[in-house]
Image: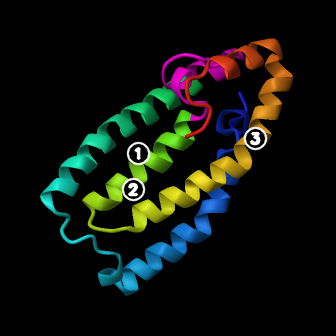
Amino acid sequence: MKLKILVGSGRKIGIFTLPFLVTGVLLNILSPQFFRVGGPPDTLRWVSVAMLVPGIVIWIWSVVLILVKVPRHELITTGPYALVLHPLYTGVALLVLPWLGFLLNTWLGLLIGLVLYAGSRLYAPEEEKILARIFGEKWDSYRKKVLLPWL
């Protein structure tokens, strides 16, 4: 199984996000006071944990499904993929990075999460065209059934 197939649009999304990540980390190192969220306060800490736990579960579950189903040339339509069209990208961008950042007392996770989400919206349609070509009617049926095609 080629790594390119397993990664999908992830490589392009990663390349899109990388300059923002590097710049953000450098700015955070040089001016950490600019990125602080104030501790975080207890309420933000609890909300962050409440969002981060399902985010990590969705991320791991999505990766496992990719590692199991893609080498078998199977379209993934169960688990988090039944809820969201791109749970790996969406989960990391909206449920992992922002809330991990808040726990680490920085807004940087939110900023990078939003950039990652923008990158996924930009490059995932290319991946969808490939899936439509490979799976045809199965893909079309899946697209109609998925609960949230995009958040």
What residue range appears in magenta? 67-86
Q: Which amino acid does label 3 sit on?
A: Pro
- Residue on which disc 2 sits: 98
Nearer the observer, 148 or 135: 148
Lower sequence index among marks 3 and 1: 1
Quadrant in the picture for residue 139: top right
From mark 3 to mark 1, how far is it between C-alphas?
21 Å
Q: Does residue 51 sit above or below 111 in this rendering?
A: above
Residue extending farthest to the right is 133
53 on left or right of 26: left
Q: What residue type is labelled 2?
A: Pro
Q: What residue type is labelled 1?
A: Leu
Q: Does residue 18 sit above or below 58 in this rendering?
A: below
- Residue on which disc 1 sits: 95
Quadrant in the picture for residue 41: bottom left
- Residue 119, visible in the rendered structure: yes
Figure quadrant of the N terminus: top right
Nearer the observer, 1 or 90: 90
Residue at the image point whose x is 57% and y is 52% from the top: 117
Q: Mark 1 and mark 3 in contact (Cβ < 8 Å)?
A: no
From mark 1 to mark 2, how far is it between C-alphas?
7 Å
Nearer the observer, 52 or 23: 52
- Residue on which disc 3 sits: 125
Lower sequence index among marks 2 and 3: 2
